[in-house]
Image (spheres, rainbow, N blue to C red):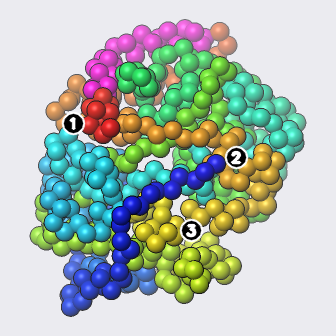
Amino acid sequence: MTFLISSVIGINLINSKDVQARSVSKTVKVFTFYNGNTNDEPHPNLFDTPIGKEITKLTGVKLKIEYATGQDEATKIGLILASGDLPDLIYGGNEHGKLIEAKVLVPIENYIQKYGKYCKQIYSGKDLKRMKQQDGHIYFLTPHRNEISPDIKPDGFWLPIDLLEKAKWPKVRYWEDYLKLIRDYVKKNPKIEGYPTIGFTFITESWRFFTLENPPSYLMGYQNDGDVIVDPKTFEAKVYSTMEASKRYYRDLNKLWQEGLIDKEVFVQNYDTYLSKIAQGRVVGFYDQYWQFGYDAEESLKNAKKYNRLHISFPVVYRGVQRAKYVMRSPIGSRDGISITKKCKDPVGAFKFLDTLCSMEAQKLMYWGIKGVDYSVDKNGKMYLTDQQKKNREDPQYRRKRGLGYWWTFPHAYLKLQDGNYREPGFDPDYVYKNFTSAEKKVLDAYKAKTFMQLPFTDPPLETPYGFAWEINIPAERKDVTIAQQKMSEVRRKYLPRLVMAKPGEYDKIWNEFVKEFEKTNYKVYEKFKTEIIKWKVKNWN
């Protein structure tokens, strides 16, 4: 597979002296920042680390950061808006649209034109156009660049390496074949290291319910658009919850349940319990996205040297579906990023800080670290890691001490820097292959691939002309759409567990009740709203 590399045309290399000159004679400014990205690991004193201090030297700014801990995103953003106690800078994560609707953010398109020296070198004119909201303003510089990173595994249905090896490296493409592999493996391996083998699991706690909701859309051959599928020709959005494909999926899960292959705690387990079961190595199959479990459960397996218990994902679809769309390329994230609030007393200074973070020097600091300590450079200018630097980088304590790996939410370049180096080590195929375990390399060799972002682990990604439907924020004034969304969610949460756990002979009865209740949710107004926004994006983005 050819890795997707951004083409930077007509951009001069950034002169490091030019960047540093901006910080000369500046007194350090302190801005408050609320980071509402619940996937970011909190750091108690990021700007007091060696890398944080270098960022301050470069920008003249130090951030006082509050993280989203102890509360979900919606609750925290609701409290911030209700109190009016806004920080200088804010990232609302999934709830960022509420900040835009509440008109508490500073439009930055004029700042971009006047002061945006560096951001205009990593965000193209089209990128900036796509970050523009429907009111005509830009409120953030998004971190969502949708690179195809070779150092992770794609979304999909997962199976352990041990199963694949014992099954002599089977082709895993169709749903029926996937289920048979699980059934056969559990029959031969009822226990793993003394624990009962779990044939299939998922997590339904809070917003993570998507691991139960989303799979039917993938199995039908659609991309992840949340709770709708979108016709690629007409761009009509349709809620798929009660479609025949969904009925089939939950009926199959019901069969697994009756066979004792689904964990009996699946509807009561919390996130930590879910991760711990995967980390024990006793889970066979599940659908999930790598970011939700890979950096915890899979790392635990590696640390315990249980390499054959690591999982590999496959783009499973229903038989007859020609193409899987588990991995898609969006032009750019259009939903969120770090914004400046109207409570900030120095919005120009705050913007200049964000702009300087877009410089090549800042990007290298954030994603590689400090030259000569965290990374090295060869005679041709290629950045690389020595064996010791690689080992250091893999140590959580080292990363925490250095301030390395805590900057994802901030603006960043697309895949490569202006000097041709990858933005971070994980994008370099040479580094990536070396970083795989011997067990993972064994899988790659068996399937004749170099990374897990290739066939047969994912179909080559297409570019979506509208991004993703789940990115669409519902304006506060569209209460009819919000209410429909809430009612649909309530009905799904009530009935999907009942469908999975249905007693023999009861599935069709519960399904009919589900469909009847779902018809009362006014879901068509939700479909119409999504369709309108999608068509607007297709027209204005392309």
Crowd class of label 3 (few under 14; some 14 to 19; many from 20; radius 10 Å): some
Question: In the rendered view, does 506 fall on the left or right side of 213?
Answer: right
Count of numbered marks = 3
Q: Position of residue 428 (x, y in %)?
A: 59, 64
Region rendered in magenta:
506-533
Quick one: which residue is furthest to the bottom in this view?
A: 25
Query: In whole angstroms, how far apart are the C-alphas of marks 1 and 2?
Result: 39 Å
Q: Is residue 519 above or below residue 205?
A: above
Q: Is residue 186 above or below residue 273?
A: above
Q: Residue under label 2, please give it.
A: 312
Q: Position of residue 14 (x, y in %)?
A: 36, 76
Circle 2 SS class: strand
Q: Residue at x 63, y 41 (%)?
A: 458
Image quarter of the C terminus: top left
Q: Residue at x 50, y 74 (%)?
A: 368
Crowd class of label 1 (few under 14; some 14 to 19; many from 20; radius 10 Å): some
Circle 3 SS class: helix
The answer to whether the residues at label 1 and label 2 have Cβ atoms under 8 Å apart is no
Give the number of the disc on residue 475: 1
Query: In whole angstroms, how far apart are the C-alphas of marks 1 and 3?
Result: 39 Å
Q: Is residue 183 above or below residue 206?
A: above
Give the number of the disc on residue 525: none
Q: Is residue 516 magenta?
A: yes
Q: Is residue 95 above or below residue 23?
A: above
Question: In the rendered view, does 417 fall on the left or right side of 385?
Answer: left
Which mark is first along the chain, 2 or 3? 2
Q: Residue under label 3, please give it.
A: 425
| Main secondary structure along the magenta-highlighted residues | helix
Q: Position of residue 318 (x, y in %)?
A: 64, 23
